[in-house]
Amino acid sequence: MEKIRILGIEIDKVSEKDALDRAVKFLEKGKKCVIYTPNSEIIMQCQSNKNLANALKQADLVIPDGIGLVLASRVIKKPLLERVTGIDLMESILNYANENNKSIFILGAQDGISQKCAQNILKKYPNIKVKGVHHGYFKGYHMGIENHPQEKKVIQLINSLKPDILFVAFGAPKQEIWIQRYKNEIDAKIFMGVGGSVDVYAG
Ligand code: UDP
């Protein structure tokens, strides 16, 4: 699959359907697939945030959620196909999960919001198994402090439930760095940083 390099970060040249197909292939093979949906602001942040840049470089799918990236790709004469927003890709993944009885875990957003998001997802997609939800505010948590007790508990909870898909909504760049740090110890297949989309689903 072709990748377009913008400011040192490779972005996948995919349509929304290509992105879904790719994620589904990983899931069906039982392999982990990490998906991020940066906009140009995030690519700019990568210039000074090594952990963020590393997270994006290690991802399986990096989707351009921003017309700025599509325009930049045209300027360098290596055009991306289209803008694929994080929320649209999340919706396609949910639709796939509903049709294939897959399970999800929603991690992030304020306490209550992640639950509301799950309720609304279930109303629309009744065949999805929502295995669990957890808010994204760990007491006394600062990025860079590993093995925070609450964080460990959340990881244990996710591992006891083994969701097919883990949506992480801590906002960028926190969610990308968090997924990169913990993906190897979390028993899930698709890991997707979804930012404010959980708030949108919560209504
Ligand atoms: N959030 C969180 N923990 C944090 C910081 C943010 O769970 O420590 C949540 C916040 O409640 C919101 C989401 O992460 O649901 C961030 O959304 P935002 O719109 O800021 O992110 P973006 O989509 O712009 O990346």
Image (tube, helix red, strand yellow):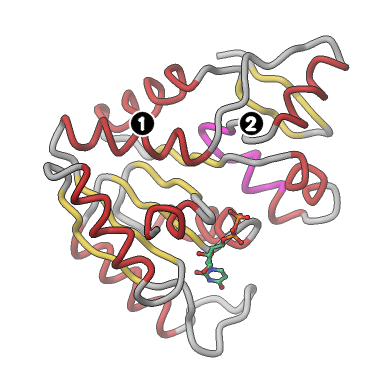
Q: Residue at x 64, y 74 (%)?
A: 144
Q: Amino acid at mark 1?
A: Ser
Q: Is residue 55 magenta?
A: yes
Q: Is residue 196 left or right of residue 161?
A: right
Vertical side of 14 occupied by 35: above or below = below
> Where is ligand 1, by quadrant?
bottom right
Task: Using the rendered view, name the quadrant where residue 29 is placed.
Answer: top left
- Image location of residue 114, percent across then percent down: 36, 66
Which element carries disc 2, helix, strand or loop? loop
Q: Residue at x 62, y 35 (%)?
A: 65
Dot 2: within a 10 Å radius of its alpha carbon, few (fewer than 14), some, or many (20 or more) residues?
Answer: many
Quadrant holding the C terminus: bottom left
Which residue occupies the extreme bottom position in the image?
A: 140
Which segment is the magenta one?
53-62
- Image location of residue 20, percent across then percent down: 39, 25
Q: Residue at x 19, y 36 (%)?
A: 98
| Mark 1 lies on residue | 92
Vertical side of 88 occupied by 171: above or below = below
The first of marks 1 and 2 along the sequence is 2
* Residue situated in front as seen by the camera: 141 or 86: 86
Vertical side of 123 occupied by 139: above or below = below
- Image location of residue 22, percent across then percent down: 41, 23
Which element carries disc 1, helix, strand or loop? helix
Dot 1: within a 10 Å radius of its alpha carbon, few (fewer than 14), some, or many (20 or more) residues?
Answer: some
* Residue situated in front as seen by the camera: 60 or 37: 37
Q: Residue at x 54, y 53 (%)?
A: 180
Picture disc at residue 55 = none
Picture disc at residue 64 = 2
